[in-house]
Image (cartoon, grey):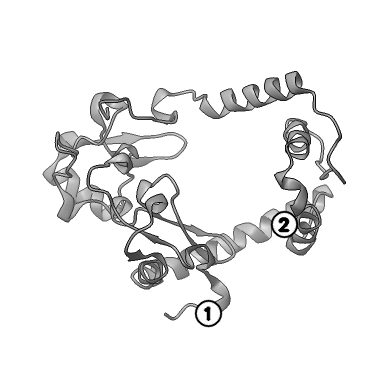
Amino acid sequence: MSLPLGDLDLSELEGKKFTCDDRCGLCCICQPELLPHEVEWFTLKYPQRIIEKKRPYRRTMLAVKRGYGSCTFLNESRRCEIYNVRPYHCRQFPFHTHIGRRVRVELNLSCRGVWYGGTEDAMALGKQLVCNNLDIARNVISETREIYRDFEINCRDAGIYRSEEFLRKEMASKINFLSELSYLAQILNLSTEDEEMTLPSAPERSINTAELKRTAMDLGLQSLSAENISGAPVYCDPEWR
């Protein structure tokens, strides 16, 4: 692997294993976005099975049943009809790659096989995933680092910049409180305010249960809202639709 050691973070994969449950099919409700070369192939082979979206950015995706269900290539037996030529989005699941200051590979915890454990070594497969896409990783990381630099400059100009070291130290000093409901309730309430948030120094002795429920309900409803139904969170019904 030819990425410098500091440019790659696989720590979230250490000691983890998973196994794909072929009775599941949950990942097939995640609408895959196609890479440019895949768009060309699917346009030629399956023009009726792809759609184009313009917001929040222009991209081409595989169509889903009835516009909001599972992938149209998932058959009645929960098998992919194009498994050998499925998009890269599908091939890399359950791994998620985030490229910021470094390349970070994690497991997607929506995959049931991650919770079951299993026989597939996540660390080995994560390394292979990066190795297979080194050129892309190098190109993207050069772009994202510039974005991070601009972000830090903007934060400094606004007077709200905090270094990673400061944030880690601040969180480490409060880590033992994060298992206490009263402390989590304080953070939940503070997160709804527009002003700069500072972690409470200690948990409160009492909890306003009614206020906590209202805040949690408001935040929960916000997370489920979407201007377009196709962008809303999707859950399977008992028939896996």
The amino acid marked with disc number 1 is: Pro
Q: Are marks 1 and 2 in contact (CB under 8 Å)?
A: no
Work out whether mark 1 precedes mark 2 in sequence or the reverse, and give the earlier one.
1
In the image, residue 196 above or below residue 9: above
Of circles 1 and 2, the one toward us is 1
Residue 79, horizontal then vertical, whole percent = 17, 43
Report the side of 97 relative to 151 (left or right).
left
The amino acid marked with disc number 2 is: Glu
Element under label 1? loop
Residue shown at 56% from the left, 60% from the top: 100
Question: Observer-nearest residue: 137 or 23?
Answer: 23
Question: Observer-nearest residue: 123 or 66?
Answer: 123
Residue shown at 47% from the left, 36% from the top: 56
* Residue receiving disc 1: 4
Q: CA distance from mark 1 to mark 2?
A: 23 Å
In the image, residue 146 above or below residue 90: below
* Residue receiving disc 2: 152
Report the side of 24 relative to 83 (left or right).
right
The quarter of the image holding the N terminus is: bottom left
Question: Observer-nearest residue: 10 or 54?
Answer: 10
Residue 122, horizontal then vertical, whole percent = 40, 65
Residue 201, horizontal then vertical, whole percent = 87, 46
Label 1 Cα crowd, 10 Å radius (few <14 / some 14-19 / many 20+):
few
Corner quadrant of residue 69: top left
